[in-house]
Image: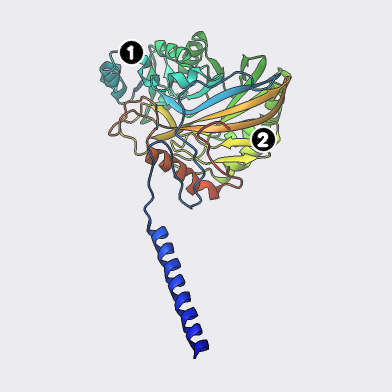
Amino acid sequence: MMKRSCILFFLTLCLLVSASICQATSEETDEPIVWPSDSVVIPATPAPEMRSEPTVAPIATTETQPGTMSITLTFTGDLTIGTNYKAYRNMNASIFGKELKRQGGDPNFYLRNIKDILLSDDLTVVNFEGTLADSVTIPASKRENQFLFLAPLSYADTLLPNGIEAATLENNHVMDFGENGYQSTMDALQQAGIVCANSTQIGVYDVKGIRIGMLAYQTFNGGYDRIYATIEQDIQKARDMGCQIVTVSYHWGEEKDYAPNSRQQKLAKATIDYGADLVVGHHSHRINPIEIYNGKYIAYSLGNFSFSGNNKPDDMLTYLFQIRFKYRRGEMFGTDFRIIPCRISSKQDYNDFAVTPLTDAQKIYTIMHNLSDYAPMIENPVENYPLEWD
């Protein structure tokens, strides 16, 4: 009898413990996710790790160890300022012109919210998509185009004071007004102190005793074949010019794609194999995931930066890509990166062209989750997207 009572007691105890465990498990599973105001919490999904809000404080450049230093580069997506000349022959009537008037006529307004970030790095590179000219003629081949982007020559002077030192000039809008418009743009930027890069001109920038070479190409109209024919020699030419860091920018892919196609991925890897230290892309107006290949980063698309082609784009999220090249006694010994999630507008309901870092945890999470969702479409996605430096 005593033995039977002990067995019944043991079975009862087991049932109670089991019920308690199930209840605890159920309560833990049903507990809602709370989004703190000062950080982003990642649920147990493939989404990459997020550590904190993006910092807008100046980047520390003091040496952490004797003989060490770092070079910090910032890359942005498409920069399109001014007017769509096809729709607004009068600059003041354009959506950009109307916003300029609301901002007191100061053409620097579109960079006001990120100026401190760009001034605190060592080099910022934008993809300049449009034409700078005070008078233009539309080429016959462009008369049917829906978009022809144009800004006054004086707008070149908004770049350097706000921390932008270089521009790539390989995209599908730099020739909106033909060779004359292109040369006008190049002249205006260079006179404003901006280093320019295109498929025939390597942009060279010296900082802290390190020479940086910037190459740029677009892949349209047979561009892939042209690039494969010259890219290895072009990278070597940059090295022969004394460039310790060589970056390559590509304008490629399809508009509104959130991931690169196979041709982009093949070219990006070949570019790294040929000796580039970094590949950065644009054109899709959408952010794409970042890949790490043979220890080098490939940022396939940074989306838009400041984009005056639409006052209500259906996706206004973007990010700044920042990379640090670390040096010890003049030799590179490592790199790391971070992203600064942004919105191409300071407004929620319309595009005011003022690029603005995100601080809202849910908006930051949206960007991170987007990058994570499309990561399986590349071979070697980065494991996480840090918002702060290691």
Q: Is residue 42 above or below residue 16?
A: above
* Quarter residue 38 falls in: top left
Q: Secondary structure at mark 2?
A: helix
**Pointer 2 or 1: first along the chain:** 1
| Residue 258 shows up from this direction | no
> Which amino acid type corresponds to the residue marked 1 in the rendered image?
Asp
Name the disc covering residue 288, or none: none
Comparing labels 2 and 1, the label whose residue is closer to the camera: 1
Badge 2 is on which residue? Answer: 272
- What residue lies at 48% left-to-right and 52% top-to-bottom? 45
> Compared to 137, does 368 lie above or below?
below
Q: CA distance from mark 2 to mark 1?
A: 41 Å
Residue, disc 1? 106
Disc 2 crowd, CA 10 A, few/some/many (<14, 14-19, 20+): many
Q: Nearer the viewer, residue 184 or 78?
A: 78
Residue 343 in the image: x percent, y percent? 39, 32
**CB atoms of marks 2 and 1 within 8 Å:** no
Nearer the observer, 348 or 186: 348
Q: Percent x, y for residue 379?
A: 60, 47
**In the foreground, 339 or 278:** 339
Element marked by disc 1: loop
Q: Where residue 230 appears, x then y in whole percent?
A: 67, 29
Q: Residues within 10 Å of mark 1 (few under 14, many from 20)?
A: few
Say which quarter of the image contains residue 68. Answer: top right
Residue 333 picture quarter: top right
Tell whether 34 sits left or right of 161: left
Count of marks overlaid on the render: 2
Q: Amino acid at mark 2?
A: Ile
